[in-house]
Amino acid sequence: MRVDLENVTKRFGNVVAVDKVSFSVEHGELFVLLGPSGCGKTTTLRIIAGLETPDSGRVLFNGRDVTHIPARRRNVAMVFQSYAVWPHMKVFDNIALPLKIKKLPREEIERRVKFATEILNITHLLERYPFQLSGGERQRVAVARALVVEPEVLLMDEPLSNLDALLRVQARAELKKLQRDLKITTIYVTHDQVEAMVLADRIAVMNRGKIIQVGTPDEIYNKPASKFVAHFIGSPPMNFFEGIVEEDAINVGFAKIPFKNISNKLVGKRVVVGIRPSDISVIPIANSVQVKGTTILVENLGSEYILHIDVGGVILRAISKTKPTSSEVILYLDKSKLHVFSEDETRVDF
Amino acid sequence: MRKIWIYIVVVFISLWILVPIVYTIIASFADIRDYYTSLIPRKYTLKYYEEYWRLGVGSALLRSIQVGLLTITLSFLIGIPAGYSIGRLKFRGRDVIKVTILFFRVLPIVIMAVPLAVLFIKIGLYDTLIGVALTHTAIALPFVVLITSSIFISIPRELEEAGVVFGLSSLQVFTKITLPLAAPGLSAAAMFAFLISWNEVVAATILSYLNRTLPAMVLTPYVMGTGGELPDPYKFAAATIMIAPALVFMAYIRKYLTAMWGAAGVR
């Protein structure tokens, strides 16, 4: 099912939690709402679920206005951050309750529960109570409960954030595969940019109640629309340094980065230039800007090293496969991977 | 070493509670001369109980249970919705209502009971079980409201919201999710309401004459009796009559109290 939000706004007292949010989710798509805590992503999800009513704007399911239709009539399912598995019911009853409410015949209920629990590998847990389950098992129960209702929209609110790191990576891959196989339109909320990159067909980055950018993971990663997005996506985070636009270059202090086609309007303006640590090399690469620097810290990640290098007062992080042999290094900044942001922090393309 | 200290404290507290109860029960069977001459009596008798039985303890006991159950029912009918709204809903004047509910505890029962007796005589509730139960409800209600509201606060909202998302109506959310999760707390509140009613003697004495509850009935000969003090074993027998049913009731309801604690703490 296609989901559209049109200028949805929600206030809590004086706080604008969701500010004129609009986006469209295509049928069968896995759409991720990504942003720091308190950015309004969960509220947006709850508005789609029907747990909150927006102050203004509309929510459309397949073009039909559902803004004022109660949650229980929307045929959505939700996986809560705390899982919200009912503690007084056995796993089977937890999964079957939504179906019992719909008065489905017993065989149908059992068939669906069997189907969902088999996909999620929890058939052996049906007779247990939630407090007898581990966090990962509880999360699976919550997902199974969401699947049995055969929802038209599946909503997930940080479903992996309560799992430990190793389990999270495993569950992430399983969720991705599950969603791809079942082709359920899914809206997924997370603050974890890696999770968003791995799972999403498209990502909407939110900050302070507003949508900053919507795009595929590649678009978000390679062409961040603002300094905020650039900073939020990628680990270790992007390097930023200030510069002044000249006629044929940007002067960033420790180097002059030549650019063609700079429009006259920009000349003399202050800008922020960004480059990801992975786009800075210690071995020569083509079409790059060379900078001399001093290594001040080396972080060993096992497979690679994060170098902290002082270039004329600015600290740049670079990723290197090899450990530098001397503290004096020459960095090669990949010119095609530079991001320029204007003073209002929006992207500038030349 | 620390363990030993804990054991000592536990034993001490247990003795503190148990010794008086056990002694009360033993002394209630003691032969009267034996009681006054030796600490642990050797001759036992059922005399005091027989005498209370002749005075109508049996039917008074039944009435007390009925009044207690009526008190639970009435205070739950009013107290659960009130507790739920105070615990869960945000509305103007919530705190004022909360304080007002507590305020009724400030009024001494005697002061409430006398005008109530006049009123009850007028409207035909005097000397009825429902009249006494209504009064006990007024006494128990603040506790029920406070206990239930804190129970409802402690139930994670997401559990109810999950119900809403998965197609349950508000009523179904309440009966299938909220209420079962609140059950252990509600049984505590029920226990409380029952014991308040069970032990209440002033209002019960003033508001009834023939159909007295157990404490009111036992108290009458206790105080007025033969114009003077009753011998001690009579008092112990009266105390035992009061304790025994309450102990049975508490042992029964304790099952529900502990049944779900393990399940409630899922977060």
Image (cartoon, coloured by chain):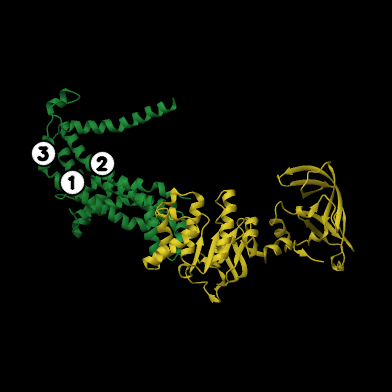
Taking depth in this image into account, of B266 and B16 the one nearest to the observer is B266
In the rendered structure, which amino acid carries the disc numbered 1? Leu
Q: CA distance from mark 1 to mark 3?
A: 15 Å
Q: Which chain is green?
A: B
Report whether B255 appears left or right of A23.
left
What residue did someone put label 3 on? B51
Query: Label 3: few (<14), some or many (≥20) within 10 Å?
Result: few
Give percent across and percent down for residue A311.
84, 48
User: Do circles 1 and 2 both sit on a common chain?
Assistant: yes
Taking depth in this image into account, of B52 and A162 the one nearest to the observer is A162
What residue did someone put label 2 on? B247
Q: CA distance from mark 1 to mark 2?
A: 14 Å
Residue at coordinates 39% horizontally, 60% vertically from top-left? B174
Chain that bears disc 3: B
Chain that bears disc 2: B
User: Do circles 1 and 3 both sit on a common chain?
Assistant: yes
From this viewpoint, is residue A31 visible?
yes
In the rendered structure, which amino acid carries the disc numbered 3? Glu
Report whether B28 appears left or right of A21.
left
The mark that comes first in sequence, 3 or 2, is: 3
In the rendered structure, which amino acid carries the disc numbered 2? Leu
Q: Colour of chain A?
A: yellow
